[in-house]
Amino acid sequence: MKKMIIGGLVGGLILFLWQFLSWSGLNIHRSQTQYTPVQNEVLECLQANNLPEGSFFLPNVPENTSSEDHQKAMESFIGNPWATITYHHSMEANMAMNMFRGYIVDFLSVFLLCFILLGNPALDFKKVMITTVGVGLISYMTMPYLESIWFQGNSIPDLIDALVQWSVAGLFLAWYLPRKAN
């Protein structure tokens, strides 16, 4: 249990620090959060039309649309503009709570990985590295990459994150976990 906790704490910190660098210091995700000079007009339009908070795919059909009407609408959308929108009425700057929650998620992710790894009695450096990087790639492929397929976004920054943060965490775990307890 001690190895899982220490592995989770240190590995989680590695993930957390990389995420900070990736999003702020290195700005790898800039292509996913681009600026538009018409942002004020877009936001004013959304607010003026009383858009509720939530995530939207435009164009779309109402929830209870029949299958036939849904199919007709989808066909009419082809070749026209479309967008995804996540809208909130007010920006909040609760950075401390967001960072705390982010670190807890990182800790739990690496803690669970340690639980899986420590179940292998023949644990060695290579197995830890392959498994850890594999977990990073699985996390990338099942969320950001699939989303980029359907919504035609750029997931390269997410791939970089997955490879770098899980490789660095893997280096620590590959050094730490196979070691015999003193």
Image: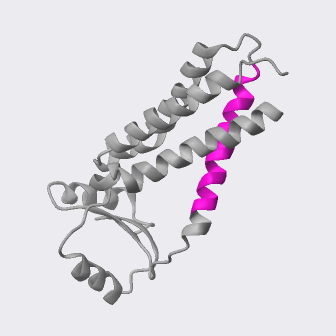
Picture residue at 40% right of the left edge, 54% below the top = 23
x 27%, y 62%: residue: 83
Q: Residue pushed farthest top?
A: 122
Q: Quadrant of residue 45?
A: bottom left
Q: Nearer the viewer, residue 151 or 121?
A: 121
Q: Is residue 76 above or below residue 108?
A: below
The magenta segment: 99-119
**Which residue occupies the foreground of this view, 47 or 125?**
125
Report the side of 27 relative to 17 (left or right): left
Q: Residue at x 39, y 81 (%)?
A: 51
Across and down, in percent, residue 13 comes to 61, 45
Which quadrant holds residue 119?
top right
Q: Relative to the observer, which residue lies in front, 121 or 176?
A: 176
Q: Residue furthest left?
A: 79
Q: Position of residue 14 (x, y in %)?
A: 56, 41
Which part of the image, by quadrant, shows the N terminus?
A: top right
**Which quarter of the rendered picture does the C terminus lie within?**
top right
The picture places residue 64, in percent across and down from the top left corner, at 45, 67
Seen at 66% across and 45% down, the residue is: 107
Residue 156 included in the magenta stretch of the image: no
The answer to whether 33 is drawn above or below residue 11 in the figure is: below
Magenta span: predominant SS is helix
- Asked if the magenta segment contains residue 116, the reply would be yes
Whether 161 is drawn above or below 35: the answer is: above
Residue 65, percent from left and from top: 40, 65
